[in-house]
Amino acid sequence: MDQLKLNKSNHFKLPTGVLGASLSADGGKLVAGCMDGIYLANLETKSSERIGQHESYVSSVAWLPNQNAIVSAGYDGALQWIDASNYKQQRQIQLHDFWSWDMSVSPDQSMIASVTGQYLSGGYKYEPLPEREPSVKLLSAATGEVLHHFEHVPSVQAVTFSPDNQFVAAGNLMGEVRVWNCQSGQQLARWTTADFTSWGIIKSHCYLGGIFAMQFTPDGQELLLAGMGPMRDPMAGNGRQLWQKWSWTDSEPQKVAETLKKEAGEGLMETLALHPTENLFVMGGRLRGGDWNVAVFDLATGTRQATLKTGFRVTEALFTTDGKQLVIVGTQGQPGPNKMGVIADFGRVEIYDFVQT
């Protein structure tokens, strides 16, 4: 493979931290789920406007071009549909009693999956209590009707669909992954990778970590998982920047690859994105130690191809449909008001050109 470089071509700020984002089909606009609402940004003019809000943080957003709509999920447990032409709310449903940690739309835009769950102590080792409500819900993108709800162990922090729309997978705090058939609702696979979870023995006694991002590989036969390696002190946030690739269709799922130790620093990884050519993927998140918090990897070999040190927490990475640009968003701290009572913008949007040399 030719040497890959990422050259920053554009950047701007949004008023508050960005927790989720989605690109329009033409790549010219970005819808951002922020701490204070839903923003629509023009990437060329760097202008933005708030087009909606939840009663709490907006955790996920997605375009639904087939319906000319934008769908969002929030820490209020609600899902909203906004008309993409006039930005008026079309529908809102109260899907969860607790937060929606993550939301995903199927590639054919027919289904939405949202995951929830509150981590409450259930025993002397603070293992999670059983769920109080279904942790994974699958619904119609057109009507909001719940098609299936699935059991898991809270909190469930990541969800994704297979490229052929047949399967949905979710991962939780304890590193447990489950995969279901979207039509029948049958559970097809279930396994646990403890590499993403830490049990606190210093300063705290609890579980921290978990799987924060998931992506099926293009053939649907494997799953990429992202998070952070285990730590003796979970409060330190210094676990290894970690992705793993699992073959899930065997009778016993098998780990087939993971971040090479020599190529990883420390920090929680929160996003995965596959390149349209299907031979590369990006992982990004927070930096605790090392020299990168966004990196590009070869999907076949797992070797690192390029890195970025952004200086801010990256919550979402997105490729334009032609694969020529990488858009990353996130948040840089949460500053307090200055002497005039004004809080500086702390949402971040950066765009990088892919350059092969």
Image (cartoon, rainbow, N blue to C red):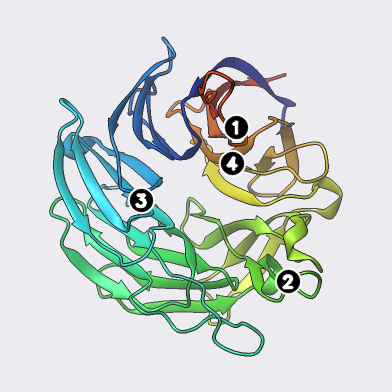
For label 3, the residue is 74
Residue type marked 1: Pro
For label 4, the residue is 279
For label 1, the residue is 335
- Image spot of residue 77 (x, y percent): 32, 58
Q: Mark 1 and mark 4 in contact (Cβ < 8 Å)?
A: no
> Alpha-carbon neighbours of circle 3 within 10 Å: few (<14), some, or many (≥20)?
many
The earlier-in-sequence mark between 3 and 2 is 3
Q: Mark 1 and mark 2 in contact (Cβ < 8 Å)?
A: no
Look at the picture and state if 86 lies above or below 221.
Answer: above
What residue do we see at 25% from left, 62% from top? 95
Label 4 to label 1: alpha-carbon separation:
39 Å
Q: The N terminus is located in which quarter?
A: top right
Label 3 to label 4: alpha-carbon separation:
32 Å
Label 2 to label 1: alpha-carbon separation:
27 Å
- Camera-nearest residue between 178 and 287: 287
Q: Mark 1 and mark 3 in contact (Cβ < 8 Å)?
A: no
Residue type marked 3: Gly
- Camera-nearest residue between 278 and 59: 59
Foreground mark, 3 or 4, reads 3
> Alpha-carbon neighbours of circle 1 within 10 Å: few (<14), some, or many (≥20)?
few
What residue do we see at 43% from left, 71% from top? 179
What residue do we see at 44% from left, 59% from top? 159
Q: Quadrant of residue 227?
A: bottom right
